[in-house]
Amino acid sequence: MNLTLLILLPLLTAVAILLMRNDAQVKWTALMGASAQFVLAFCLLFAFRKERALGNIAQMLFEFHYQWFPSWHISFHLGVDGISVAMILLTAFVVIAGVLVSWNVTKMTKEFYFLLILLSLGAYGFFMSLDLFVLFFFLEIAVIPKYLLIGIWGSGKKEYAANKLALMLMGGSALVLVGLLGVYFGAPNHNFDLMLLSSMHIPIAIQKICFPLLFVGFGVFTALFPFHTWVPDGHSSAPTAGSMFLAGISMKLGGYGCLRVATYILPDGAKEYANLVIVLSTIAILYGAFATMMQKDLKYINAYSSVSHCGFVLLGIGMLTKTAMVGAVMQMVSHGLMTALFFAVIGMIYERTHTRQVNEMGGLIKVMPFITTVLFIVGLCSLGLPGLSGFVAEMTIFMGSWQNADLFHRVATIAACMSIVVTAVYILRAIGQTAMGPIKEGHLSVGDARWNEKLAAIILIAGIVAIGIAPYWLNELVTPAADIIMHKIATK
Amino acid sequence: MLNDFLLLMKSELVLAFILFLLLIIKVAAEVKNERLLALIQILLLGNFIYGFFFIQNGSLFGGMYTTNGLIAFQKSILSLGIYLISLLFSDWLKKSEHLIEFFILLLSAVMGMFFLISSESLLMFYLSLELATIPVAAMANFDLHKKISSEASMKMILSSALSSGVLLFGISLIYGATGTLNFSAIPALLDGTGVQILAFIFLFTAFAFKLSIVPFHLWTADVYEGSPIAVTSFLSVISKGSIAFILLTTLYKVFAPMHGLWYNMVMLLSIITMIVGNLFALRQQNIKRFLAFSSIAQVGFILVGISSNSILGTASVVYFVLVYVFSNLAAFGVAGVISQHSGKERIEDYRGLYQTNPFISWVLALALFSLAGIPPTAGFFGKLFLITAGAFKGNYFFITVAALNMIISLYYYLRVIRAVFMDSNEQPIGKINLDISTKLGMIICGAGIVLLGLLSWVYDYITALSI
């Protein structure tokens, strides 16, 4: 399968959107483009599994090579392993759901969908690139659409939030840039190629400088404590699809970067700073959970709980065991689906009740049974109910963490585990207040979900349940790739 | 001999031909501005295309003038710049009473820059620098009815006179210390004595004036604000570009033996220039002043690339200037169109521009993103290559400062983007009907900004020339 298709398709969709004449055409073009992405992502999954079943054990499959800037040894190098395939699937799910829920955007529709598709282009490119320059290129492509999405279509303190997000993310990518240049010049021969770099031994002194730069740089994207402050503002001000993309895809760029770039090519650095990563991510998990308890606004609740949940991703990486690493990837996928769904539901509720404050709602199950059911499902997934994806991912991380037998890791694991209790408190409280009890006067006449919203929710729920009930397919996909990364860390 | 002369100096000769043609038209015929401008645009386009043919290496005038593929390409970049200026500011130019004089001055200045890039001796260097400066000072005064324009011109003359004096003093010191003015003879005679260092500092100061490197930047903002926008764009893009090119030759070739000394100097000045340019740009309200300070910061970035002292440095700087021609001219072009049609030059007047003028807004957004270094625009590649070239020395502090400055600059570029796309305005700038050539100019700029980075052969071509 040709991986460039996954870049060309969003590109063509984006161009086609610009050429459309009216809003209806724009929407349908975007939906067709997103559906094609969805189909293509599944094609990739099946092609990947087929290759593996045929016994192709190459680390990266479907590699694509094109000399881009030969004088800098930059090549347009694409390729996928199990982790990339999982992330690409996640992106496809979120994109199609995002396009569906924004069906009734009326302000500058063309530009809105153009930016959404552009963002997905950046994400696909990022997850597939095996050249650090190309990876950085796609990472930055994904920043500006977010800024415009929040700034133009957002609500509340949108300009402040958009600015904060853009500057913090660009700050993160500036650190990434310096780290990448450090690796480029520190490696025995100047190169940006990920596979080549991973096979070389980069001097330990360089690793010790570059690992924190890269990890913190990518960490900003995935709400590493104390660089998480853009998350609540950004998510709560963004339009619904913007929040979904932000939490579902964009935060995962950071997690993937921490894993694929920082940890994989700088294993000594990873070992050196693993404990610090664990401390910071445990703080993020607990702090995020407790901060969520105090929130009254549904979007803020989900934003802070994202800080907490993304902390698990970094915790899984920091534990440096294979199981925890697999768990981290699963948590990325699971949280991406779950949080996208959560934001979608919040958007649906807000559109009907015109409030996101929990205490101004109540009894919504009477007027919008479908939406509240989805809210229940996503809430239960968030607090880790077995049978849904959240449980599988977090359980895997805890099991992986427990494999480290020393006191420090055990304490961190137990502390992180405690957040589950807190999660249960805030989720149940929020859902209970929203869905149960007496209904508020003004909300009696609101309707239930429309076809597009139902479709979006069903697609995302399908993903969540598929991971929850049958986690082995994701596990099978991710484990060999995690194995290679762990093997590298263990041998160095 | 004549053959050599004709071939090697072909770009200057074409310029001279256009110049005399314009003079003859001025004297002999009454032509309407519209048709005259169309003629000039065609001539400049021809000049740009012709720049890619009959490229030869060689030197003239007893080694005072030299040319090769890279120099020819640098001249092509400048030719492209003036062609774009003639397109982008056609509205303003058509209304000008002195269209021919404007282009005669502009072409003489460009001629000076061509000789400047080609100069192989300090004497030639000085003469051509003067030729490149004095017409521009006259051009700065081209808004004949505005006092602020005369003020700009006066400031420009005074500061260039000062820098010329400093330069001449430096040149005489070099001559005193080495006994030669020839670029290829000087390096062997440099041994780092005090006089030579002093001479170098004087010489570099003159460059710093022309490139508006901090702390020699004080004239820039006032001159940019006072001059007509077409002249401002010429000053900030074409002039700066040509000086950056000759600075490359001077540092890499003439002062190569003193590399250790100038590396530190360039690094320090680069850091100060980036920081000061960026911090002052944060608060500007006038779009011209804003672009003036942003261009100061961009020069700081060019210095990052220059500090690398390698082929990659040359290639990156030339590439960046090419990118800069497209992006900065596009930004100035938009500012010029708006100022011409509404008389508004403040950033807050741009609020709600997208609602009335989506095309211009997208061009402006592309240009600003390119200046800020956001992919997929060419500015991203330009800045990244400059930084990578600068990192060659392994000085990560320097690189980190440069990378952090990219964030500061993003903040103020986003200010304009926010005004254009997000803010609402009770009295937005009305719908502007673009002149066809202005539109063409903007489309060329936009296409250049998008394609220049993605099509890597442009950069490869420059690298191949730089060796």
Image (cartoon, rainbow, N blue to C red):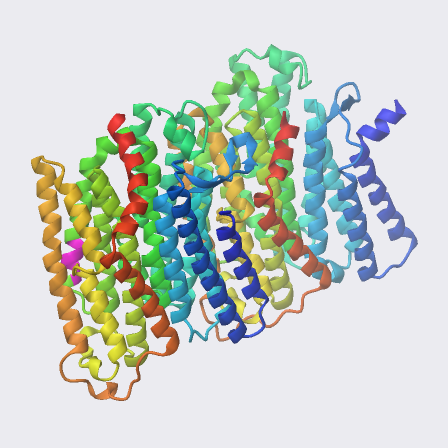
Q: Position of residue A237 (x, y in %)?
A: 33, 65
- Residue at x 77%, y 31% (from the top left corner): B55
Q: Is residue B422 above or below residue A43?
A: below
- The answer to whether one can see residue A424 in this image is yes
Quarter of the rendering occupied by the C terminus of chain A? top left
Near-viewer residue (A380 or B163): A380
Apparent side of residue B58 relative to residue B329 in the rendered image (left or right): right
Per the picture, the main secondary structure of the magenta-coloured stretch is: helix
Near-viewer residue (A218 or B124): A218
Q: Position of residue A132 (x, y in %)?
A: 43, 38
Extreme residue in the front direction: A54
Q: Is residue A290 magenta?
A: yes
- Residue at x 38%, y 71% (from the top left corner): A101
Q: How many marks?
A: 0
Near-viewer residue (A440 or A27): A27
Extreme residue in the right direction: B28
Q: Position of residue B439 (x, y in %)?
A: 68, 60
Q: Is residue B254 above or below residue A173?
A: above
- The answer to whether one can see residue B300 in this image is no
Q: Is residue B167 magenta?
A: no
Near-viewer residue (A134 or B349): A134
Apparent side of residue B360 relative to residue A310 in the rendered image (left or right): right
- Residue at x 72%, y 63% (from the top left corner): B436
Q: Position of residue B265 (x, y in %)?
A: 47, 26
Apparent side of residue B231 relative to residue B404 in the rendered image (left or right): right
Q: Is residue B111 above or below residue B2?
A: below
Q: Which residues are magenta?
A: A287-292
